[in-house]
Image (cartoon, rainbow, N blue to C red):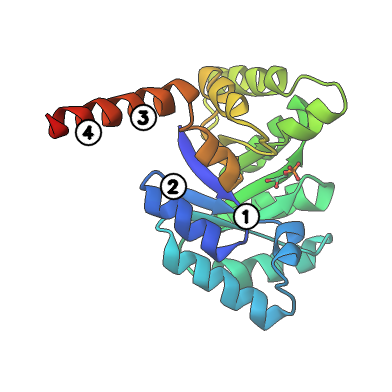
Amino acid sequence: MKFFIDTASLSQIKEANDLGVLDGVTTNPSLMAKEGITGEQNIIQHYLDICRIVDGDVSAEVISTDFKNIISEGEKLAGLHKNIVVKVPMIKEGVKAIKYFSEKGIKTNCTLVFSASQAMLAAKAGATYVSPFIGRLDDVSTDGYELIKSMRLIFNNYKFKTQILAASIRHPMHVVKCAEIGADVATCPLSTILALLKHPLTDIGLAQFLADHAKGEKK
Ligand code: G3P
């Protein structure tokens, strides 16, 4: 499974990249705003900065919601760097735009996906990635894993190449379960990526090994 980091923070992207296990980055307008990135030129520069840190796909989301403007915004974003993936919302105009981009060889990530029917449409339109938001489904007492299982089955049945990018991940077990049920990618905050490596027995065991070694050295 590929690991993406879900943030627009350059320092967090650097920290995750330094671990050596990072395959890409996802951003969204809320994450960009959280970093204080506003204005077209600053936004463009920020995507370029991210692409300089990570050698992998970087999702950059369009703000437009009508076909014509999604296309012009998406083409501008895609032209910035070969690793930019145009992130498009799951709306009617978005599906049309994904089809257009796929015919032009521009990579897309269909975002805000909450049902298998939406995922199927995105795959039919030729999306590179489709992003089910599993944490937000959990928030409304709905099982996000069931959605991913259904998507996996449908994509396998019809050999769709679209990759399942599990998003809105909140904790390490989300990542583990998504890997078990066949998501292609998990995009996580830095805190979740770092939480993957923690176990109290590792910490206790290491402290014991180091203490025993120190005792031996004193003899
Ligand atoms: O990639 C989408 C993700 O950022 C949404 O996460 O935690 O806001 O539901 P969250």
> Ligand 1 shows up in which quadrant of the image?
top right
Question: Separation of disc 4 and disc 1 at Cα?
Answer: 41 Å
- Quadrant for the C terminus in the image: top left
Q: Amino acid at mark 3?
A: Ala
- The mark that comes first in sequence, 2 or 3, is 2
Q: Residue 23: which disc? A: 2
- The mark that comes first in sequence, 2 or 4, is 2
Camera-near label (3 vs 4) is 4
Question: Separation of disc 3 and disc 4 at Cα?
Answer: 11 Å
Foreground pick, 86 / 200: 200
Within 10 angstroms of label 1, few (less than 14), some, or many (20 or more) residues?
many
Residue 79: x %, y % from top left = 54, 71
In this view, the residue farthest toward the right is 140
Question: Separation of disc 1 and disc 2 at Cα?
Answer: 13 Å
Q: Residue 207: which disc? A: 3
Residue pictured at 82% horizontal, 21% vertical: 142
- The mark that comes first in sequence, 1 or 2, is 1
Residue pictured at 47% horizontal, 65% vertical: 51
Camera-near label (2 vs 3) is 3
Query: Dots 1 and 2: beta carbons under 8 Å?
Result: no
Residue pictured at 14% horizontal, 33% vertical: 217
* Circle 4 residue: 214
Foreground pick, 178 / 151: 178
Residue 170: x %, y % from top left = 68, 35
Q: Is residue 10 visible?
A: yes
Question: Separation of disc 2 and disc 3 at Cα?
Answer: 32 Å
* Circle 1 residue: 7
Q: Is residue 84 left or right of residue 39?
A: left
Question: Separation of disc 3 and disc 1 at Cα?
Answer: 33 Å
Q: Residue 60: which disc? A: none
